[in-house]
Amino acid sequence: MSGPGGIGAPGLGLSGVLALRAQLLERSESLARIVQGVPAPAEAAGSAGFAEALAAVNRLQQASEARTSAFERGETHDLAEVMLARQKASIAFEATLQARNRLLGAYRDIMNMPV
């Protein structure tokens, strides 16, 4: 599991893990902006990015459920809109889950480093 660098892949040291962490935080903020349709700012917004991404994923899932329920009740006949909403929610959830898994993996690797 650990290479000569001590974490994950061979040669990936503490600086590599910190760089990976920064990338994950940036991607979580990017995911939140994509979901909300907000253009990217010039500088990072801070550590609230992952929480915002989770909230955005939650909103997408609720919108998907609402559209699916409306379709099932016969209030709408636009199946493409329903399927598009479901796919957006699914992709956003999978991306968030992958970011979470990578963050947890990096955290575990750092915690298992010998002092």
Image (cartoon, grey):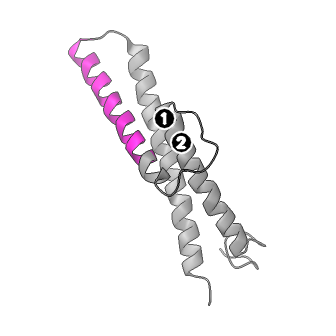
Residue shown at the point (29%, 11%) measured from the top left: 76
Label ID, residue 11: none
Image quadrant of residue 30? top right
- Judged left or right of residue 100, residue 65 is left
Residue 48 highlighted magenta (yes or no): no
Where residue 86 appears, as percent x and y from the top left, is: 41, 29
Q: Which amino acid does label 2 sit on?
A: Leu
Above or below: residue 26 compared with residue 7: above
Residue shown at the point (41%, 17%) measured from the top left: 81
Disc 1 to disc 2: CB gap under 8 Å? yes
Q: Which residue reaches farthest bottom?
A: 115
Image quadrant of residue 103? bottom right
Location of mark 1 (residue): 35
Residue placed most toward the observer, 77 or 48 = 48
Q: Which amino acid does label 1 sit on?
A: Val
Boundaries of the magenta span: 53-75
Residue shown at the point (35%, 29%) measured from the top left: 64
Where residue 38 appears, as percent x and y from the top left, is: 52, 33
Location of mark 2 (residue): 31
Q: Quadrant of the C terminus?
A: bottom right
- Element at badge 1? helix
- Disc 2 crowd rating (10 Å Cα; few below 14, some 14-19, many 20+) is many
Q: Which residue reaches farthest front?
A: 42
C-alpha gap between disc 1 and disc 2: 6 Å
